[in-house]
Image (cartoon, coloured by chain):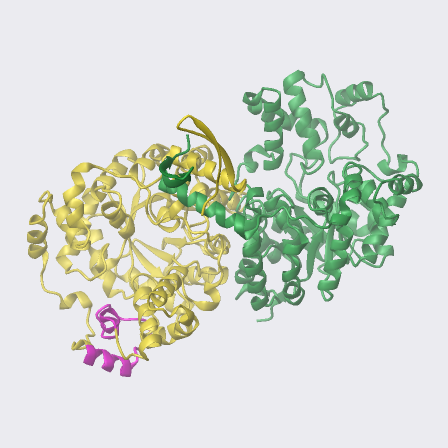
Chain colours: A yellow, B green
């Protein structure tokens, strides 16, 4: 039996710890696994993106550019892959095209090979410039479809979007399922549809989270439909809100017409490495093992908890059900954007405002921008009445063109801004860092010289916790305490 | 599109807590979920078996017969299902046929509907009598194939075994994958093979554990091949060494040519119930989330940890690798039995003995019995040299017939034995309980009147633990301590 080889992208160094432990893993906890990762036979290793960049400068006092340089040195034989938010780069606003060019050039120079370029609204115009920049740099431009479910999203629509991305020069197509919503049948249908429409040579990469417990089956059906590369995480960094286990994927394909070329001995070493690392970050982990609520609510878990805390802050924690019923209405008014950062926050916050203050009585600035086209186009038309409210409240006119076309050149100002900061080293890298995270970079530049600061626990702390838990099981503890030469019997119990 | 309905067996009340929390869940933690389980639309609810019976009388001071009666009352509309170890019933030796008859009659009288009958060696002669007894009682006799991997186990062999079970009158066939070894392709091939050989009307139930992370895909392929019923556990009682989540199965089939008839609102209530119960038993849970080692080692996790503790007890913890290499040799000598209770313990202990004392220098009584045919026949021939060693050491002759045919009538003696015990109530139920667990029942009979004793934690204990863990995070704690009228400031830190 001739077997088709399925490529694998390992996400342990980026999305796995982003999803499992709030992106807190320090570079020092990754370096010892890199030689094995480099030799394991992956198609690529995802290792950089918005949240990891942010976390480096916000929590870990690590220069994210140095992290990338280190990966390049430690994994010379592997394609390094990153997630790029199109015209947003790694930030939360649209950047003028020259900033996009600079970022892509620098990332390529530091050794990035594969750029997975996406847009939260699936507006191809927001990918266009970044994709072209990647191609000019001679790197792999992966055009991305964000998968979501709505009355307007269809298999045919996704297939058509793939065609647009291919016309744009995409070297491959990524089907990105950030909410673990991709069920086996649509996974099969979309990938089969793309292959049939544009040819079997079109490379398709599939990215699924494991939150709903069903997406390893979706990967199986995706592979049967012709998918070329799938994303997984080494088992000790897998499951829950993360990804399907790499070793389980290998086992899944044994005996089928498909195979991976992964080296199981290397996988075991990578697994063992991260199984000692993961407990250090347990404080950042959620308890979610599997959660299928999203299939009925259509609301990602992170968005839900965000809305809950907004309501609680307003003393209205009991109104979550109303907000959950409001979300689909707001989403429809906005033209059915996929609910992924930042659209999930924008729609969620507006739903909270609508419930607390009356429907569209007060708009957030971001929601007004969304309604006025400043984030781009969604799949559906936006509600004209709400557009009019946005126009009046925001005192801005709606736009219909590519959002970045409305921006003035800004590179020189960004350079001047960053060079004025204490601790800035005057490089374009620092300018880009500050451009994308202006609220965080200034402090990072000041403290950068102090070097990395891990937020993981030490082995001693883990041991102390285990002891404390053992103690708690036994209830109140009696101690003999010597104090001032006299012995006392003391019973200690937490108040 | 016409959709085929897939039945679902919920295992939360038996195998899920057996696999996740050492079978410790008390009846009181189940009763509040029963109304929802009864109305959810399951094909059956597995709720009784050897380990739950044992745990009731060993740890929980619960009468297992009363537990069954309670289930029957609380779930009047649902098929109750149990796992029956063929001629071993729920115990660890072969019982004479009349004992088997009595047990099946009593279980049926208490309301058991579906008897999943299996034998660790897959020797049909060990199922024959129990299956016939089930049919005489007018209940559903499910003939079981224990799935394993060896050089001798083939798809054709499993298909043939299914035929033998059908000839025996099996109302359905269970494919039982207790070690999460069943990969998608063999799952498909075996079920397709059975359906093609014996007709599409043959009902096939598939039972998989989730340990290796791959078996939800195996259930998908099993269903594509024609499987009729699959076993799952409600999500809050799923994954790890347990089973695939029920809700994920529902999501998996949406949009496919298959569907379940489960009521998602009920599933959510069941899930929420057990999500509050599970933490009470956290002390019994293993940390295993996913483990694919078994595909290379062929040694189930429980067997491995058992051998490790045997070695450690002998001060030879460093010889585990030798033992792991010895296991395949011992298994081959015994004719390749599936490694499941009790064969896993028998083979594992002998492998330890061989490494510590020299190959077959000392045999355990159980291994000698296995070699001499007293457990039945395996798929392969047994090593004649080792049979000869067993004959000499055990001073017993090899047998080739059905093991139970060599037993003398024993019912009257069992009655007399149990009636002599303090606290025995003189019923056939007590006779059966003592017959199956003679080392445990006498003490249970004595303490039965004291009523159930939960070993789960209370909410107060859980809160105390959480506080202790919080404290450990914060490091040293300062206390104000009043002692003899004087106030002291004391800093306490674990040494």
Q: Is residue B55 left or right of residue B277?
A: right
What is the x, y in percent for residue B235?
55, 56
Which residue appears at 9% of the width and 59% of the height?
A410
Camera sees residue B283: yes
Name the residue nearer the viewer: A308 or B19: A308
> For the C terminus of chain B, which image quadrant?
top left
What is the x, y in percent for residue A67?
25, 40
Which residue appears at 89% of the width and 37% of the height?
B405
Which residue appears at 56% of the width and 23% of the height?
B317
Occupied quadrant, residue A392: bottom left
What is the x, y in percent for residue A233?
41, 45
Which residue appears at 66% of the width and 24% of the height?
B351
Name the residue nearer the viewer: B166 or B426: B426
A479 to A89, vertically: above or below? above
Name the residue nearer the viewer: B39 or A312: A312
What is the x, y in percent for residue B50?
73, 45
Residue closest to the far front: B485
Q: Is residue B4 left or right of residue B433?
A: left
Name the residue nearer the viewer: B428 or B331: B428
* Magenta stretch: includes residue A248: no
> For the N terminus of chain B, which image quadrant?
bottom right
Total marks in image: 0
Occupied quadrant, residue A62: top left
Query: Which residues are drawn in magenta?
Result: A364-393
Camera sees residue A121: no
Occupied quadrant, residue B365: top right
A231 to A275, vertically: above or below? below
Q: Is residue B197 left or right of residue A35?
A: right
């Amino acid at each position: 039996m001739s077997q088709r080889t399925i490529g694998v992208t390992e996400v342990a160094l980026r999305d796995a710890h982003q999803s499992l432990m709030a992106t807190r893993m320090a570079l020092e906890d990754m370096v010892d696994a890199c030689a094995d990762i480099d030799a394991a036979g992956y198609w690529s290793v995802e290792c950089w993106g918005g949240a990891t960049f942010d976390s480096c400068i916000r929590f870990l006092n690590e220069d994210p550019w140095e992290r990338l340089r280190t990966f390049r040195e430690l994994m010379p034989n592997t394609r390094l892959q990153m997630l790029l938010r199109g015209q947003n780069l790694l930030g939360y606003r649209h950047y003028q095209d020259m900033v996009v060019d600079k970022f892509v050039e620098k990332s390529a120079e530091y050794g990035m090979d594969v750029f997975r370029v996406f847009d939260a609204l699936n507006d191809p115009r927001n990918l266009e410039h970044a994709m072209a920049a990647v191609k000019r740099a001679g790197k792999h431009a992966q055009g991305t479809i964000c998968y979501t479910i709505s009355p307007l999203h269809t298999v045919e629509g996704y297939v058509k979007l793939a065609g647009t991305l291919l016309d744009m020069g995409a070297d491959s197509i990524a089907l990105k399922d950030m909410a673990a919503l991709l069920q086996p049948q649509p996974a099969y249908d979309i990938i089969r549809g793309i292959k049939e429409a544009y040819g079997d040579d079109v490379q398709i990469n599939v990215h699924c989270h494991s939150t709903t417990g069903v997406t390893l089956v979706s990967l199986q059906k995706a592979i049967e439909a012709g998918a070329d590369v799938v994303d997984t995480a080494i088992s000790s960094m897998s499951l829950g809100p993360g990804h399907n286990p790499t070793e389980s994927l290998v086992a899944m394909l044994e005996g089928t017409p498909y195979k991976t070329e992964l080296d199981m001995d290397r996988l075991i070493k990578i697994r063992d490495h991260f199984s000692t690392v993961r407990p250090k970050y347990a404080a950042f982990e959620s308890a979610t093992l599997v959660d299928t609520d999203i299939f009925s609510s259509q609301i990602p878990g992170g968005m839900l908890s965000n809305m809950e805390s907004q309501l609680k802050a307003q003393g209205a924690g009991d109104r979550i059900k109303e907000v959950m019923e409001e979300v689909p209405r707001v989403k429809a008014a906005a033209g059915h954007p996929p609910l992924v950062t930042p659209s999930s926050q924008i729609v969620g916050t507006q739903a909270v405002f609508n419930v607390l203050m009356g429907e569209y009585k007060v708009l957030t600035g971001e929601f007004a921008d969304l309604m006025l086209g400043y984030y781009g186009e969604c799949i559906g038309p936006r509600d004209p009445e709400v557009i009019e409210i946005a126009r009046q409240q925001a005192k801005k006119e709606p736009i219909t063109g590519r959002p970045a076309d409305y921006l003035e050149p800004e590179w020189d100002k960004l350079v001047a801004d960053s060079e004025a900061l204490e601790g800035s080293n005057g490089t374009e890298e620092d300018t880009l860092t500050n451009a994308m995270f202006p609220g965080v970079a200034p402090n990072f530049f000041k403290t950068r010289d102090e070097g990395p600061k891990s937020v993981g626990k030490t082995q001693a702390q883990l041991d102390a916790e285990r002891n404390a838990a053992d103690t708690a099981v036994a209830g109140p503890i009696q101690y003999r305490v010597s104090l001032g030469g006299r012995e006392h019997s003391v019973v200690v119990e937490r108040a």
